[in-house]
Amino acid sequence: MRVSKLLEGPLWLVGAGNMGGAMLRGWLAAGMDPDQVIVIDPGAKDLPEGVIAWPAPPPDGAAPAVVVLAVKPQLLDTVAPAIAPALERETLLISILAGVEVASLRQRFPAPEGVVRVMPNTPVAIGKGVMALHGAGLSDGAADLAGRLTAPLGLVEWIAREDQFDAVTALSGCGPAFLFRFIDAMADAGTALGLPADQAARLALATVEGAALLAAGSDETPGQLADRVASPGGSTREGMNVLDHDGALKELMARTLSASARRNAEMAAAARG
């Protein structure tokens, strides 16, 4: 189903930076009509053709069917006073603000009955994102709308408890950045072994892309796939011995995700006021 057919009114995208812009491109690719979207962002630039941007909510017009909050969490109290009065009980409020809990959103936006927190990641722009959803006050129709609005952007997972967002943010929300670092590190290691830097970068990127697609389509776990490649006494096994020694890679990722989750919890505490 075309995304545009899901909406009975305009969608306000409050903030069109990296993540908001990625979601917008994903929706347009999935068939959303550009004239159904109003971007509210005084600094918006390089928007897709046909999308209108306003520095503030339109002074006249229909109340939004959906509002997507996509500003930096630190700007919540800057944008809320202008946005909140325009919302109605039936407006579905969707927030991608890391660390801002439902209770904090209701303090700033008291009118909407249905509130959904979403933690997306940047591959939503190509329909390959990951989105964790948690809702409050949702009718069956509002929950269905939230799910179908996010479905064209990638994998959608509803989480049972809001306190799981710290873990989700660290794993899938921040995960692409960690993987990009890993690709760079592979390329740098290839260059150190004598490959031209540009060739090493292409090989590293294509290797990760192919391996990810293989893992996504396999009935085996990534760990099983790794062991299948790593023949005893072979070169792959020798390299994996470095990663596996004393749980080095697992310990590194545990510390990485824990740092991100801890920061997310700190932002949640700050948003509570």
Image (cartoon, helix red, strand yellow):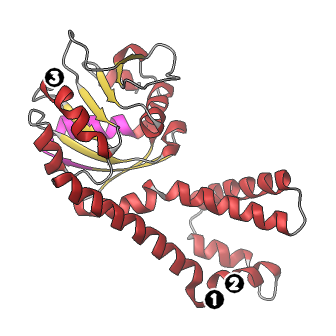
Which residue type does callout 2 highlight?
Val
Q: Residue 169: horizontal and vertical position, in percent?
A: 38, 58
- Could you tell me which residue is drawn at 24 percent across and 63 percent down? 163
Residue placed under numbered mark 2 in the picture:
242
Residue 13 sits in which quadrant?
top left
Tag count:
3
Measured in 3D between alpha carbons, the distance from the residue under mark 3 to the one under mark 1, in whole angstroms, is: 57 Å
Mark 2: secondary structure: helix
Report the magenta residues as a range: 134-150
- Could you tell me which residue is drawn at 13 percent across and 34 percent down? 112
Circles 3, 2 touching at the beta carbon (< 8 Å): no
Q: Is residue 229 left or right of residue 153?
A: right
Instruction: Report the front residue among 210 and 201.
Output: 201
Residue 41 sits in which quadrant?
top left
Question: Which circle marks residue 86 in the picture?
Answer: 3
Question: Which circle marks residue 74 in the picture?
Answer: none
Residue placed under numbered mark 1 in the picture:
245
Task: State whether residue 161 appears in this view.
Answer: no
Q: Residue 3: horizontal and vertical position, in percent?
A: 38, 26
Which residue type does callout 1 highlight?
His
Report if residue 245 lies within the magenta region: no
Task: State whether residue 98 appears in this view.
Answer: yes
Q: Residues within 10 Å of mark 1 (few under 14, many from 20)?
A: few
Mark 1: secondary structure: helix
Majority secondary structure of the magenta segment? helix
Mark 3: secondary structure: helix
Instruction: Report the front residue among 239 and 141.
Output: 239
